[in-house]
Image (cartoon, helix red, strand yellow):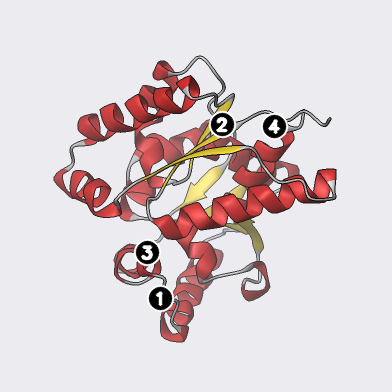
Amino acid sequence: MVLQKTIGLLGGMSWESSIIYERLINEGVRARLGGTHSADLIVRSYDFATIEALQEAGDWQAAGRLLATDARQLQDAGAELVLLCTNTMHAVAPAIEAALDVPFVHLADTTAAAVLAAGIDTVGLLGTRYTMEHDFYRCRLEAAGLTVLVPDEPDRTTVHDVIYDELVKGIASPASKARYLDVIDRLAARGATGIIAGCTEIELLIGPADVGLAYFPTTQLHAEAAVDLALD
């Protein structure tokens, strides 16, 4: 019998992102183990409206308590490592890590490792306004040795609004894709040689073939890291 660790997923922010995580992790396990193998997962999915309300209110403490409690419940249910299936809510990663005795796989760390392995040192970061403007994510990338550029206004508003008004609802429009590609072009003009898709839902809109720079889909990288750890 092949042994694999049980992965706990804090997801559903939005559920569009959780589905991507589950698919990628299951596909990764099947590719490695073959046959009818799939991942051993425990999933906590949320009503995204609850999470969005906490974000808009700036009540990160309450959000941290919520996610930390649920992360511990995943551990108690048998999870041997835990992933948070959203870039933005890594703003409360310290609270989650403090609640766990099992490894918490930090999304920014897996992303930084992939960027550095590609020989890139200056990246453009796309994500929600919270991810682009707050320091919890960008500073973690910078601590790894990267130079991180975020879009200027009004591009930050464009990137954020497309995520919340369209992508979290499963809408991926050609017009929004064109706007994102324009934002990426402006980041490249400022010196970015790679682009981080720092929001899971962005991967519904923009793929590697769309970008003329090195492209780092954080969900894919995070899922691959989870599979590596689960099968180690």
As drawn, 176 above or below 19? below
Query: Contact (CB < 8 A) between labels 4 and 2?
Result: no
Q: Residue at x 35, y 72 (%)?
A: 166
As drawn, 109 above or below 198? above
Q: Which residue is label 4 attached to? A: 230
Secondary structure beneath label 1: loop
Which amino acid does the dot numbered 1 rest on?
Ile
Earlier along the polypeptide chain: callout 2 or callout 1?
2
Which of the two marks, 4 or 2, is nearer to us in this view?
Answer: 4
Secondary structure beneath label 3: helix
Earlier along the polypeptide chain: callout 4 or callout 2?
2
Q: CA distance from mark 1 to mark 4?
A: 32 Å
Task: Count neighbours of disc 3 (C-alpha within 10 A) and say few if under 14, some if 14 to 19, many if 20 or more.
Answer: many
Q: Which residue is label 2 attached to? A: 105
Q: CA distance from mark 2 to mark 1?
A: 29 Å
Give the quadrant of residue 94: top left
Q: Residue at x 74, y 42 (%)?
A: 117
Q: Is residue 210 left or right of residue 153?
A: right
Secondary structure beneath label 4: helix
Q: Is residue 203 left or right of residue 55?
A: right
Query: Contact (CB < 8 A) between labels 1 and 3?
Result: no
Which amino acid does the dot numbered 4 rest on?
Ala
75 or 210: nearer the eye?
75
Q: Is residue 80 left or right of residue 128?
A: right
Which amino acid does the dot numbered 2 rest on?
Val
Earlier along the polypeptide chain: callout 2 or callout 3?
2
Which amino acid does the dot numbered 3 rest on?
Val
Quarter of the image with the N terminus is top right
Q: CA distance from mark 1 to mark 3?
A: 7 Å
Q: Which residue is label 3 attached to? A: 168
Q: Which residue is label 1 attached to? A: 171
